[in-house]
Amino acid sequence: MKIKLLDIAHGRSGDKGDAANIGIIAYEEKGFEIIKNQLTADRVKKHFEGICFGKVERYELPNLRALNFLLHNTLGGGGTVSLKHDAQGKTLAAALLRMEIEY
Amino acid sequence: MKESIKIASGQGFWGDLIDAPYNQVTKGDIDYLVMDYLAEVTMSILQKQKNKNPKLGYARDIPELMRRILPICKERNIKIITNGGGVNPVACAEAVIDTAKSLGLNKLKIAVVLKDNIMERIDDIIFKGCELRNMETNDSIVSVKEKLLSANVYFGAFPIVEGLSGGADIVITGRTTDTGLTLAPMIHEFGWKENDFDLLSAGTIAGHILECGAQSSGGNFLGDWQTIPNMAEIGFPIAEAYPNGEFIITKHKNTGGRVSFETVAEQLVYEIGDPKEYITPDCVADFTTIKLEDLGKDRVRVYDIKGKRATDFYKVSCSYESGYSASASLTYSYPQALTKAKAADKILRKRLENLQLKFDEIRTEYIGYNSCHGPLSTEIEEDKINEIMLRVAVRSSDYASVERFGKEIAPLILTGPPSVTGFAGGRPKPSEVVAYWPALMPKTMVKPEIKFIDLQKEDVI
């Protein structure tokens, strides 16, 4: 069954220079197994095509049922240099939760 | 030794809820109030203010805030720790002393942490072999030296601890890590040592949870945010800390918001990189070791945290001038709102091109359509769109080009697509772009200095 990531997870995003950080947290253990298997760095990189122009790093925080992604070259220069309306990538966690996953 | 202490977050950034610190000191018992005022670009703004007036360069909200909370904090023995001293913590302390005098207080001791500002020492530091290479590009700082606006070392918790040990009621610092503000009272009260890396990591993580104010107590919460109670009167987070490094995140009773596994977890993953390597001047904390237990009733226990020795470097945050930018917006209404906005953008760009202006970047976004999620945005049928705000931003090293861009927006109202509004406030003026330069510096090259300012003695020790 296909569902949206936002049905099983929440998260928060922010800036680290020109990189955006997106932390995704599963509501339950089962959800964490699913995101651990399906949310690969490659998949996230592909999802953000046209937004993320650098590499994507992925980290696991199993105690928090969470994954952390660092999306390099994503914020148009970052900080005050960026011309983006969302220069700090605050809405990118919500953008990742749009992803369709297999449940 | 106290069995536990309560450390309350009073401010998540400069500009946060004005009443939050007041509520923290009045709505329940706390021992420490910590307030983070400094974002990466704040230092450059403060440096500019100080350049114009040597009495400025700190968070000017502080003296006014102190007028409200100092009498309460003195009465209840609540210590205050803030990095709002910016690039002029001594002037900030003096302003607070003046406030205390005008309130009729006769006893107040302020500790000021100095020497984080290395702006005057850049040449010497380069001469001694540290080129403050940019952590992202590896370029030497020499390449932007003439354009530097500010340069500060991030100190950790220990200089603050020195202030607290010296009997300070208030500790005012310049560039100190956000996490150090919260860690310091734990070190001070519980006697933690510089090599208690697990304990220092625990306090650091408590600091990370507190540093963005209500972001850990129900604010900006992406989970079931509609169920967060009474966000209008949201309670800011409080860490109830214990000597063994465990702490409980909570908030005052009878305040809005929520403290739960989910709200704390969201803050824990905010603005982190490699979770095993959360580097501060005090330790390297391992976020993968954090355990959370939701105790219910807005109480979350945080425990089992591990960490390791700090690195031999301080992080240095520099800012430098990097050209100019401006942004402008116009709103187009139904029918064909998006089509009109796109046509206006095309016309504007053609005019800018005809004028042969020089830009490093021109960026167009359609607010109401794709300004947040870009290509991930869902296509909408033109018929269903009520209105679209066209937002165009430019950046250039050429001031005149950015200034001229500002003059090309309003004309679109009478010379472009119809049913357009929302151009108030005049021509957008070019603003200076302040770019950020992160670097590292050996800890041996700079030593924090503590200065005490005592109201009772009316002089500086």
Image: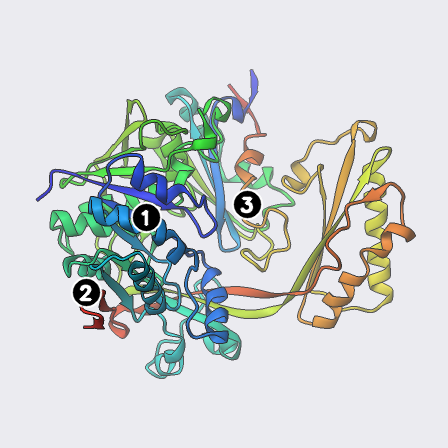
Residue B133's disc is: none
For the N terminus of chain A, which image quadrant? top right
Which of the 4 image quarters holds residue B249?
A: top left
Left or right of B94 on screen, residue B411? right
Please name the residue that numbered disc 3 is placed on: A89
Labelled pair 2, 3 in contact (Cβ < 8 Å): no
User: Callout 2: few (<14), some (14-19), or many (20+) C-alpha neighbours within 10 Å?
Assistant: few
Q: Numbered disc 3: what chain?
A: A
From the top left corner, tell me how far across and down residue B174 is, in percent: 35, 63
On the same chain, marks 2 and 3? The answer is no
Please name the residue that numbered disc 2 is placed on: B456
Q: Looking at the picture, which amino acid does disc 1 mark?
A: Ile
Residue B69's disc is: 1
Tell me if residue B173 can be seen.
yes
The one nearer the camera, B13 or B308, is B13
What's the CA distance linking mark 2 and mark 3? 48 Å
Q: Looking at the picture, which amino acid does disc 2 mark?
A: Gln
The one nearer the camera, B176 or B278, is B176
In the image, is residue B221 above or below residue A1?
A: below
User: Callout 1: few (<14), some (14-19), or many (20+) C-alpha neighbours within 10 Å?
Assistant: many
Q: Looking at the picture, which amino acid does disc 3 mark?
A: Gly
Which of the 4 image quarters holds residue A4?
A: top right
Q: In the structure shown, which secondary structural element does the residue marked by tag 3 occupy? A: loop
What residue is rendered at 66% in x and 62% in y?
B325
